[in-house]
C-alpha cells in the first residue's frame, strides 16, 4: 500500500516562507512525475509545480520566481520551497506522485493535503 506523507504547512505572514515535504512510502515503483497542486476555497485544484524523473520542472505562472521544487529520488521525496508568500497562496496543497506502468499509463497518487494560510 502506498502512502504520501506531507508536512510543512501552516500559518505565515505575507512575505514569509514555508517548505513543504512529501514522502512516498510503501511499494511504489518507477516514479516519474512528482509535484504539488493546490486548491483554494471555491476554486478548482490547480497545478503549482511539477518535476520529472529526468529533472525538468514546470511551474504555474503565479509562482514562478517565488517557489522552487526539488526532489530526492533516493528518499522518494519531493519538496516545495515557497518564498515571498502572499494571501493569494492560501490553499490546501496536495502532493502528487505519478508512477509509470508500462509505456502509456501513469498511476496517480495523492497526498491528504496540507493547509497553507498566508495572513496579510
Image (cartoon, rainbow, N blue to C red):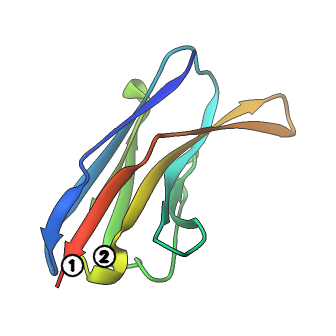
Q: Residue at x 55, y 21 (%)?
A: 2
Q: Secondary structure at mark 2?
A: loop
Q: Residue at x 53, y 57 (%)?
A: 50
The one of 32 and 36 positioned closer to us in this rendering: 36
Of residues 115 and 69, which is closer to you in this image? 115
29 in relation to 79, above or below: above
Residue 35 image point, x, y percent: 50, 51
For the question of whether residue 82 can be seen, the reply is no
Return the residue at label 1: 84
Where 30 falls versus 79 (above or below)? above
Do the residues under discs 2 and 1 have CB atoms within 8 angstroms? yes
**According to the image, label 2 marks what residue?**
66
Of the residues under marks 2 and 1, which one precedes in the sequence? 2
Image side of residue 61 versus residue 107, left or right: left
Q: Residue furthest right?
A: 104
Mark 1 lies on a secondary structure that is loop
Amino acid at each position: 500500500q502506498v502512502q504520501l506523507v506531507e508536512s510543512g504547512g501552516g500559518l505565515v505572514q505575507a512575505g514569509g516562507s514555508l517548505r513543504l515535504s512529501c514522502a512516498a512510502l510503501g511499494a511504489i515503483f518507477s516514479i516519474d512525475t512528482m509535484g504539488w497542486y493546490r486548491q483554494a476555497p471555491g476554486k478548482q485544484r490547480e497545478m503549482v509545480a511539477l518535476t520529472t524523473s529526468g529533472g525538468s520542472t514546470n511551474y504555474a505562472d503565479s509562482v514562478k520566481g517565488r517557489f522552487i521544487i526539488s526532489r530526492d529520488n533516493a528518499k522518494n521525496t519531493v519538496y516545495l520551497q515557497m518564498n515571498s508568500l502572499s494571501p493569494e497562496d492560501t490553499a490546501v496543497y496536495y502532493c502528487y506522485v505519478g508512477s509509470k506502468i508500462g509505456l502509456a499509463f501513469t498511476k496517480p497518487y495523492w497526498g491528504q493535503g496540507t493547509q497553507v494560510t498566508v495572513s496579510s
